[in-house]
Amino acid sequence: MEKINIGIITSLRKQLFAYRILFSEHIQSPARVVLEAASLESISSNSLIHEKPELLLLDYRLVFKDTALFFSLLNNRYPNLIVIVLVDQTQLKEAKRCQQFVDAYVAPNIEILQLFTQIRNLTVRSPFMNAH
């Protein structure tokens, strides 16, 4: 199976580093990281991103204040993007207000093979992914 392009947006540097290593080094990784950012604003339109992400891992803490605006800006920049929100169990109820904008919720400490399976399942079901 061809690896898909993913982006990771989180303000936690340790989390970003851990996901980058897991996706690049794990033999069962279904994806390659093509975008890393601490916020949506930190992704410059002139950045050196050669490939657009097809799936985004997004830290919930970055979107909870103005959910609709954030996802509107995200959709303008990356239409048809599959979004997985990283959310702690204590914030899951609050995060459900993003439901219309996201494809899945996962805990930041999810077992990596479960995350890989989730990514594979979402990309197989997406009509936009099958068009590539």
Image (cartoon, rainbow, N blue to C red):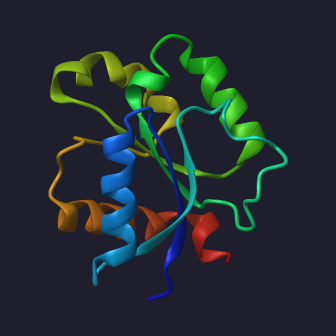
Instruction: Name the residue at the top extreme.
Output: 65
Quarter of the image where the C terminus is located: bottom right
Q: Quadrant of residue 113?
A: bottom left
Image height of 112 relative to 30, above or below:
above
Image spot of residue 52 (x, y percent): 69, 61
Left or right: 120 as drawn, with respect to 123:
left
- The residue lying at 71 percent from left, 67 percent from top is 51
Q: How many marks?
A: 0
Left or right: 68 as drawn, with respect to 56:
right
Q: In which quarter of the image is residue 59?
A: top left
Image spot of residue 56 (x, y percent): 51, 50
Image spot of residue 130 (x, y percent): 59, 75
Q: Quadrant of residue 116?
A: bottom left
Image height of 105 relative to 98, above or below:
below
- The residue lying at 39 percent from left, 48 percent from top is 16
Image height of 41 relative to 93, above or below:
below
Instruction: Name the residue at the bottom extreme.
Output: 1
Q: 58 or 43, which lies in front?
A: 43
- The residue lying at 37 percent from left, 68 percent from top is 23
Quarter of the image where the N terminus is located: bottom left
Image height of 27 relative to 7, above or below:
below
Instruction: Name the residue at the right extreme.
Output: 46
Left or right: 128 as drawn, with respect to 26:
right
- The residue lying at 76 percent from left, 59 percent from top is 48
Left or right: 13 as drawn, with respect to 9:
left
Q: 62 or 124, which lies in front?
A: 62
Image spot of residue 82 (x, y percent): 53, 52
